[in-house]
Image: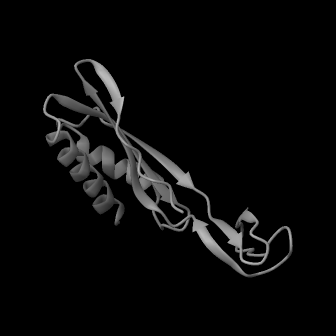
Amino acid sequence: MHEMGIANSVLEAVRVEAARHPGSYPCRVGVRIGELAAVDPSALEFCFDALTRETDLESLQLEIEICPRRHRCLDCATEFRVKDFNFECPRCRSLRSECLSGDELELAYLEVEENGTVTAGKESPERE
């Protein structure tokens, strides 16, 4: 179950960032997972909960955003969602395309509470 390793890596990143801001408390962390990333969101949540239970991060909330598989046609530049391994462009019917999203696994944001105020950390840049 590699979800345990992923959850542990997320928590390590949260702790590193929290240490850089004394007096702040992490309250929410967001993760983006692509459909192709081979990560089970339920298993990730389970592992995250197990790793934070009875720790200083027990109240930390994990938010998971599932990113659909999207492609761009190399012939007409139409962007489309790939479903059921159908790579055909809905506009020109070409089978030539490039993957734009769906394989990501990234830390999207971290919200921290400082002096009673919740502030959102910088979101990671969108994939180009």
Residue shown at 46% from the left, 47% from the top: 64
Query: Is 107 situated above or below 116?
Result: below
Query: Is 67 situated above or below 85?
Result: above
Quarter holding the N terminus is bottom left
89 vs 64, left or right, is right
From the top left corner, tell me how far across and down residue 127 is, in percent: 51, 60
111 vs 52, left or right, is right
From the top left corner, tell me how far across and down residue 32 is, in percent: 46, 53
Quadrant in the picture for residue 82: bottom right
Q: Nearer the viewer, residue 4 or 90?
A: 90
Residue shown at 19% from the left, 40% from the top: 18
Quadrant in the picture for residue 122: top left
Query: Is 78 situated above or below 61?
Result: below
117 vs 128, left or right, is left
Quarter holding the C terminus is bottom right
Residue shown at 32% from the left, 59% from the top: 6
Q: Nearer the viewer, residue 51 or 14?
A: 14
From the top left corner, tell me how far across and down residue 49 is, in percent: 31, 44
